[in-house]
Image (cartoon, rainbow, N blue to C red):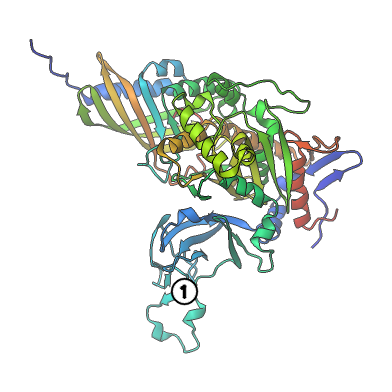
Amino acid sequence: MSVRSYIIDDREQKRFLLDREVLVSEDVLRTERAQIFGRCWIYVGHSSELKKPGDFRSRKVAGRPVIFCRDQAGNFHCLFNTCRHRGAIVCTEREGNRRRFQCIYHGWTYGNDGRLVGVPGADAYAESFDKSSHGLRRPARFEEYRGFWFMCLDEDADPLPDYLAGAKDYIDLVIDQSPSGQMEIIAGVQEYDVAANWKLMVENSVDDYHLPATHSTWLNFMANSGVKIEPPKEEGLVLPTRGKAVELGNGHFTTDNVNFRGRPVAKWIPLYGEAAKAQIDDIRGELVARLGAERAGRVADTNRNLVIFPNLVINDGSSVTVRTFYPDGVGKMHVTAWALGPVEEGEDARARRLDAFLTFYGPGGFATPDDVEALELVQQGLANWADDRWSEMSRGMGKEGEQLNSDEHHLRIFWRRWNELMGAQT
Amino acid sequence: MTVAPPRVITRAEVEDFLYHEAALLDEWKLNEWQELLTDDAAYYVPPNDQLEGDHRTTLFLVADDRERIRQRIIRVLDPNCHAEFPKSRTRRLISNVRIVARDGDLVTVAANFVCYRYRRYERIREYVGAYRYILRCAGDSFRIKERRVLIDAHELGTLGSVSFIL
């Protein structure tokens, strides 16, 4: 399929424009479901959410109800939460531990590996009825990278590690916070809707240009808490420290910033309190001993917002959040966000991580509600799209070499990849 | 010398206090509201899926100590707090007020609430749930030592955010 391009990518005039129709069109959304969500690797969940055989979580992944579970042998599965008989949801609990999932409608029963193990009144079926071919269906592919499980509906997709490309290095960097290389999802999920197109959340997650305008109250709070907020020292920068945007292949990208906002692992700021100083020193000492000074510095003194195309964001900033979102109509998305931390984290360090999370992120945080407001204002403003058609995304295009976190290079990476997958002629 | 027995606390007194608090919050008189708090006050909104969680081990929506409450109020009263500018109009109805425990000068109170939130051009948001208070007796009134807001919705969903004091 080939459609017109939704972007104007003029490398000569150094201008990049986005057709706002992509944020309001039902036709575009239908095509996205097939070309983007039907072909890309989509985040399902984290190994740490299923600690024992039989553990399960039911959730929606890109709008599809699935059961993320482990069988009795401990193998991980992603099953469509849809009875093979007449289509009802078979697992209605959010989470738990079960050997079997029984549909309440007629009682068809499935093992936690998806096999159909029970059909009431099975003798009424002809001999040709084959129970073994009526297990719960599942996405064509289901693979893991270091605890992060993804599904793909396209049988012919590249293996997950190839798909992740350069994003693997940044996932590794996040995981290096843990002495054993194991991170875990912390209890307590944040699920909220944003009345805006899902792609606006991709942009917002890595767009450091918006911080001073959108988040001045957060910067004030940091200053009130004793964090030094200095004016930027370099042309083009908008934050106290330097940050760049990095392309990671296959539409993935990240910011890579020198930290000024503190790191639970392991850069102390006054907000953590004097008593935390010694503990942060210890955590840092462990990092240096394990990773060497240079790599420890990368872990502790830089922060990053990583986008794994199309809809997974790992913000390793004030704390670590794993955030995914999917469209529910052109002007609405559901967001799910978790906190991530090292499995061996001590009690005080864990409490500090969660507190640091809330200084910025989430529906009650000091910054996220203003992001949500910004995205919703964009969506409202887009009612004029037919008469004011193009969004401007050219920041940084005029210069050679490294692109800053406050440029729009990384946003362009997303839109170029999106445009290509949508089948656009460029 | 005999110690005076602790005074009897009635539901009506507690209700009067909660209604007064609700009025201050709905009218955005947050600096006056702060005066109702003890110096060690805390404000919690647990996540929808872990209402009984501990904020030190569970990711909450809000887990403010006294200083964070002060900072939250500076933030939400600032016109640059975009999620609350222009301010939401809220109206909270409080009911089913019960005194559930008494320990010296501390009184544990439970109440149900509905809080309607309106913003221009936006759908109505209806926050429904339970308040749990730990109040400290102070003269003939109370101070709030702990304020916990349990939201009934299984996910925040269309409620979107908790950018005001719920």
Judge by depth and name the residue closer to the eye, A16 or B65. B65
Q: Residues within 10 Å of mark 1 (few under 14, many from 20)?
A: some
The residue lying furthest to the top in this view is: B1
Q: Is residue B54 left or right of residue A230?
A: left
Q: Residue at x 43, y 54 (%)?
A: A94
Query: Disc 1 designates what residue?
Result: A115
For residue A63, side relative to residue A8 (left or right)? left
Say which residue appears at 78% left-offset and 58% top-offset.
A423
Write the residue at 7% across / 10% down: B1
Residue B105, x across and y down, in percent: 22, 21
Residue B54 placement (x, y as % from top left): 37, 39
Quarter of the image containing the N terminus of chain A? Answer: bottom right
Q: Secondary structure at mark 1?
A: loop
Disc 1 marks which amino acid?
A: Arg
What chain does mark 1 sit on? A
Vertical order, A119 against B86 (above or below): below
Q: Nearer the viewer, residue A13 or A19?
A: A13
Mark yes or no: residue A312 visible: no
Pick whichever, A383 or A96, lies toward us: A96
Indicate the position of residue A393 as horizontal and vertical percent values.
78, 38
The residue at 36%/32% (across/down) is B148
